Amino acid sequence: MPTATPGARDRILQTAHDLFYRDGIRATGIDRIIKEASVTKVTFYRHFPAKDDLIRAFLDYRHQRWMAWFSRTLEAQTGEGKGLAEALAATLQNWFEDEAFRGCAFINSAVEMAEALPETLPIARAHKQAMVQYLADYLPDSAGGRQQAAMLALVIDGAIVKAQRDGSGQEALMLLRAWLALLPAAED
């Protein structure tokens, strides 16, 4: 059965996603997105009147896509009988070893775009808060469990930045595993 060709908006968004994540938002011009998405300028601007509109759409798309991948991968890891700590480390290892890994799109965009498009900061905070809530679902439903989820998210962010900075996730994963071993609830 043939698959449907993505519409122009979807092609633009997917192209922008790939280029923004790989090369950075500021380094990626609209003309390049138009060319690589195989759309006309009229079509592009009909869907995204300004680059800022595309950036907001990119961040929303990235959030949905990344959270779906993260939850699916973490659930598969815990389904294999791994505790939360090992499942988190295995999930992040999977991501860090991907040749397309360029760190966290939300950390990157918050740093890159904070002055030019200040609304990237609350978007990044909302993404990070969704991560904390998702992690909290794996921990005891208590103030301590929510605090542990926030700590896990903070350590995960540190591991992501280290893996990006180092160009390899090996040391970041080793340090993450060592830290997670200190967290009893994450082993359950």
Image (cartoon, rainbow, N blue to C red):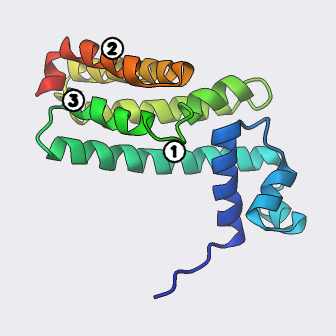
- In the structure shown, which secondary structural element does the residue marked by tag 2 occupy? helix
Picture coordinates of residue 39 (x, y %)? 80, 68
Q: CA distance from mark 3 to mark 1?
A: 24 Å
- Quadrant (top left/top right/bottom left/bottom right) for the N terminus: bottom left
Alpha carbon distance from label 2 to label 3: 13 Å
Is residue 125 positioned above or below 10 on the image? above
Check disc 3: other Cα within 10 Å, few if <14, some if 14-19, many if 20+. many
* Residue 23 falls in image quadrant: top right
Q: Is residue 15 above or below residue 146?
A: below
Q: Which residue is mark 2?
A: 175
* Rendered residue at 83%/55% (across/down): 49
Task: Give the residue type at disc 1.
Answer: His
- Sort mark 1 into few (<14), some (14-19) or many (20+) by Cα contacts within 10 Å: many
The local secondary structure at tag 1 comes to: helix
The amino acid type found where label 3 is placed reads Glu
- Regarding mark 3 in the picture, which secondary structure is present there? helix
Q: In the depicted view, which residue is nearer to us: 22 or 184?
A: 22
Q: Which residue is mark 1?
A: 63
User: Which quadrant of the figure has residue 74?
Assistant: top left
In front of the other: 161 or 166: 166
Q: Is residue 22 left or right of residue 183?
A: right
Q: Amino acid at mark 2?
A: Leu
In screen coordinates, is 111 left or right of 35? left
Which residue is located at x 53 percent, y 24 percent? 167
Q: Which residue is mark 3?
A: 86
In the image, which is nearer the foreground, mark 1 or mark 2?
Answer: 2
Residue 121 appears in the figure? no
Dot 1 and dot 2 residues touching (CB under 8 Å): no
